[in-house]
């Protein structure tokens, strides 16, 4: 593979930038699909006491024309949790769902419990997630600065910011629900994505020691990416295949976590190859190019 990656850095930056701008345009027009953790709502716990079909419960709830998540719980999955987002006629919806459950599964009043959830927890969750990402980014910057140099640390943090923004933008465009699982997915991607970037940076450092006098930084980064791209793609694809299997075969509650993870994995692989290294190369070569121009 002799393709020059650093040379076309404007294209690699433009592609995700367009996606991010479109995504944030969608956010400005219609906002996010916020889950119960952020806008409030209620949980209905029903102890059915026997095996049941989740689709039957989902059909009962769908008759109320409300957005709800149906989760299996309890021993042998004999309980059900219905998570309802806040609606104006909340109490009326509760009564209709409870009556439908009692009629279908012959339940008494003690077998059903209702718990109201406020949006306060969601705001605290977002605040803690933002703080966590900022702290993680600061420690990653310091770590890579010590291990490599400050420029590489800053470009690695930019690549992480790219991954988070892409995940947020695509989530807005596709209407994926924003809940606690989504926040967990963001934090997972931040930790996973930096791994591939450091592998490429390690190869850059090795080649820089061997070829620093013969090649420019752009040529070294290109060669380093070419040498490690197979490893990067293989590692990412095996993880993507495993997460995709969870999404296809898993229950509904797992899909809220696995779909954002899939998007983040693809964004992280892209940024490791096409964003972090090329930015480092261009930044490092720029002062040298100025000196060369002055000398000429």
Image (spheres, rainbow, N blue to C red):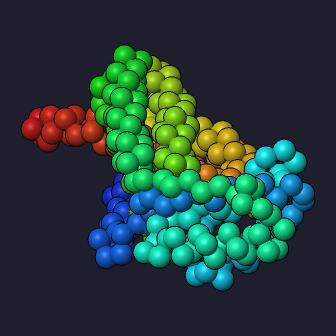
80 and 287: which one is in front?
80
Left or right, 43 with respect to 139, comes to right
**Quadrant into which the C terminus falls:** top left
For the residue pair 7 and 112, the one nearer the viewer reads as: 112
Up-down: is 57 above or below 62? Answer: above
Against 239, residue 99 (above or below) is below
Q: Residue at x 54, y 76 (%)?
A: 92
- As drawn, the residue found furthest toward the right would be 51
Residue 200 placed where, x, y %? Answer: 52, 34
Instruction: Choose between 126 and 189: the one closer to the eye.
Output: 126
232 left or right, relative to 213: right
Between residues 111 and 68, which one lies in front from this camera angle? 111
Task: Give left or right: position of 106 versus 268.
Answer: right
Q: Quadrant of residue 95?
A: bottom right
Residue under the image location 52 percent in, 70 percent down: 91
Q: Residue at x 52, y 35 (%)?
A: 191
| Coordinates of residue 209 in the picture (x, y in percent) | 44, 19
- Count up the numbered dots: 0
Residue positioned most to the top = 146
Residue 241 in view: no
Q: Position of residue 129 (x, y in %)?
A: 41, 40
Residue under the image location 54 percent in, 40 percent down? 188
Residue 164 visible here: yes
**Left/right of residue 279 with respect to residue 90 in the rendered view:** left
- Image coordinates of residue 275 in percent, x first then y, are 41, 47
């Amino acid at each position: 593979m002799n393709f020059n990656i650093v040379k076309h850095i404007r294209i690699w930056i433009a592609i995700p930038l367009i996606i991010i701008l479109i995504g944030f345009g969608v956010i400005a027009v219609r906002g996010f699909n916020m889950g119960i953790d952020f806008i409030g709502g209620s949980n209905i716990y029903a102890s059915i006491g026997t095996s049941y079909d989740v689709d039957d419960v989902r059909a009962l709830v769908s008759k109320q024309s409300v957005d709800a998540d149906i989760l299996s719980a309890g021993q042998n999955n004999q309980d059900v949790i219905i998570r309802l987002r806040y609606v104006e006629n909340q109490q009326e919806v509760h009564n209709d769902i409870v009556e439908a459950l009692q009629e279908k599964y012959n339940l008494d009043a003690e077998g059903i419990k209702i718990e109201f959830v406020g949006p306060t927890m969601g705001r605290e969750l977002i605040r803690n997630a933002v703080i966590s990402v900022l702290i993680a980014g600061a420690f990653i910057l310091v770590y890579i600065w010590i291990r490599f140099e400050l420029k590489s640390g800053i470009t690695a943090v930019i690549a992480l910011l790219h991954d988070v923004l892409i995940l947020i933008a695509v989530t807005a465009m596709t209407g994926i629900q924003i809940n606690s699982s989504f926040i967990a997915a963001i934090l997972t991607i931040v930790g996973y994505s930096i791994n591939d970037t450091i592998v490429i940076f390690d190869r850059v450092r090795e080649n820089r020691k061997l070829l620093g006098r013969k090649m420019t930084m752009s040529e070294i980064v290109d060669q380093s990416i070419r040498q490690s791209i197979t490893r990067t793609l293989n590692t990412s694809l095996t993880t993507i295949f495993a997460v995709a299997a969870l999404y296809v075969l898993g229950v509904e509650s797992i899909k809220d976590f696995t779909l954002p993870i899939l998007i983040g994995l693809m964004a992280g692989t892209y940024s490791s190859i096409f964003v972090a290294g090329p930015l480092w190369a261009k930044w490092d070569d720029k002062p040298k190019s100025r000196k060369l121009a002055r000398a000429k």
